[in-house]
Amino acid sequence: MLSVCLLLRWGCLLPVLLLLPGLLAAQPAPLPAPQGRFLKPTVLVGEPLDYELRYAHAPDLEVVFPDSLARFAPFEYAGKTFYPTRTRNGVSLDRAIYHLRTFRLDSVQTLALPVAVLQGPDTLSILPLPSRVRLRRTARPLPAGATAPPRLRQNLALVPVEPVFNYPYWLAGTLAVLLLLAGGAALFHRRLTRRYQAYKLRKNHGYFLAQFARHVERFELSRSATNVERAVVLWKNYLARLENSDLNSFTTRELVAYFENDNDVRKALNATDKVIYGNLQTEEAAEVDRAFQRLRGFAERRYASIIQ
């Protein structure tokens, strides 16, 4: 009876023993562990500290390194530097350097950042061996027998501080001045424009009178028809700018018609045309002088009527 039970028991275990080597062979190989290390053995409080994380793995693995939201205690995260994946001889290498700071006073501080490996719907977190860094203290140790740190020495002497240019206030002041100038220009634009135009007219009028008097003086000295022609051309050009028109291209008849048959314009231009296009006679010099006076007087009247 006992033999029959043993045979039945071994008959039930035999299929399991036969399948066990296949099940063991089907299990995946364990993943390699990443490597983490501090790039210097000691650090001061608040001093920048770099932590290097490396992971060599198969090229088909999806690996995710920690970001700024990871847990870096007892350190504080200050930045990171990632390097592109390099694959050589069928092995891919991922590498990143994390920039940290510490404000803890522990003599020895450790850190181990995990690497996440994505395998279908599962995520495996693999930790490297903890890396240690030693805190380098700058304060002297207390003397033997001392129970409290020494008292601080008070120093109330003022330290000269170099003045710094106050950019915000200057920018605000400059902006306020520009706004005032823009407002003033918008408010007094028409008045300022009229004053500027009056200034230009007054300056051009003074220049015309001086040049016209010079041509008249030259005519009195030489009695030349060229000086008469130059004086008439100067008069036309001045009136063209004054009237904002192309009067300098008008003929004598067109000018007389434009100025509504003004007596001074008609008589003066008729007299100058005789001198320019005819022969100058000695007894006609007095008539040319009167023509100059009429042209100058008419120009002054037109100027006075426009600036009013």
Image (cartoon, grey):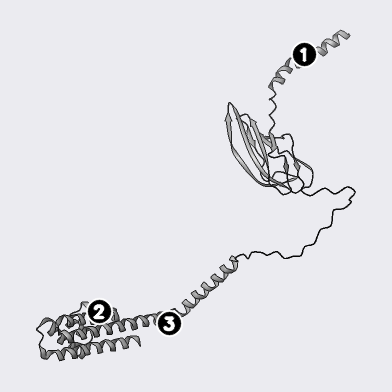
Q: Are marks 3 and 1 in contact (CB under 8 Å)?
A: no
- The quadrant in which the N terminus is found is top right
Total numbered labels: 3
Query: Residue 306 location, x and y as percent?
Result: 32, 85
Q: Label 1's element?
A: helix
Q: Amino acid at mark 3?
A: Arg
Alpha carbons under labels 3 and 2: distance apart: 27 Å
Q: Are marks 3 and 2 in contact (CB under 8 Å)?
A: no
Q: Amino acid at mark 1?
A: Leu
Among the two numbered marks 3 and 2 on one chain, the one whose residue lies closer to the N terminus: 3
Looking at the image, which is closer to me, 49 or 188? Answer: 49
Residue at mark 3: 191
Query: Residue 140 location, x and y as percent?
Result: 80, 49
- The quadrant in which the C terminus is found is bottom left
Label 3 Cα neighbours within 10 Å, binned few <14 / some 14-19 / many ≥20? few
| Residue at the spot 64% in from the left edge and 35% down from the top edge | 63
Query: Residue 61 location, x and y as percent?
Result: 63, 31
Left or right: where does residue 232 sit relative to residue 198?
left
Residue at mark 1: 14
Label 2 Cα neighbours within 10 Å, binned few <14 / some 14-19 / many ≥20? some
- The image's mark for residue 284 is none
Alpha carbons under labels 1 and 2: distance apart: 126 Å
Residue at mark 2: 237
Question: Which of the 4 quarters of the picture holds residue 271?
Answer: bottom left
Q: Label 3's element?
A: helix
